[in-house]
Image: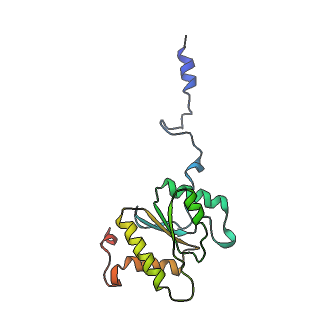
Amino acid sequence: MVRVHDVARACWRPRWWPRGRRHEGKWAQGIPPRNFTWVIRDHLAISERPGGFSANHRRVRRQEEIIWLKVQQFDRIISLLASPHNLASYEEEGIASAHYPIGTTGDLRPQLSECYRDIDASLAAGHRVLVHQDELGDRLMGVVAGTCSGPGGSRPDPRWSR
């Protein structure tokens, strides 16, 4: 025979715990990458490299930030790093990625035109896209500005009026 107070004890939860909430730690949802910013809300975002850059890079932090990106339903990550770091980690988590190395010297037009085509195609397909480099700097901002200016650079893209 089951008594009422036995059922109540089995279903007990603290008063502050909302109903229907899954019992997960606060880190189960991951942490956002540093300097994460939406450029087009819910479509295009920018941030530092997941895990930090150079001497500040930490594998555990990278994993937590990739978990957050997955929970936020990012479909594509575009890396502008000079080296292919993090690409294997994105593949392990099942997030599509692309690598367009934007260096400090040389002709960048071929990489930039491919990058812009990739961003435009991904946004047209309705994907959530994150573009990152080691840090939020002039090169990343230049890529975003080139994306914002639209084809030919003379007229703004209609998506930016939101």
Residue 142 in the image: state x and y as whole percent: 47, 81
Q: Is residue 151 above or below residue 19?
A: below
Q: In screen coordinates, is 13 left or right of 120?
A: right
Q: In screen coordinates, is 96 left or right of 65?
A: left
| Residue drawn at 46 percent across, 80 percent down | 112
The colour scheme used here is: rainbow
Q: In screen coordinates, is 39 left or right of 132?
A: left
The outermost residue toward the bottom is 106
The image quadrant of residue 87 is bottom right
| Residue drawn at 63 percent across, 60 percent down | 61
Residue 17 in the image: state x and y as whole percent: 53, 37
| The N terminus - image quarter | top right
Camera-nearest residue between 150 and 21? 150
Residue 145 in the image: state x and y as whole percent: 42, 79
Q: Is residue 78 above or below residue 61?
A: below
Camera-nearest residue between 87 and 72? 87
Q: In screen coordinates, is 48 left or right of 146?
A: right
Residue 101 in the image: state x and y as whole percent: 54, 78
Q: How many marks?
A: 0
| The C terminus - image quarter | bottom left
The outermost residue toward the top is 1
Q: Is residue 123 above or below residue 30?
A: below
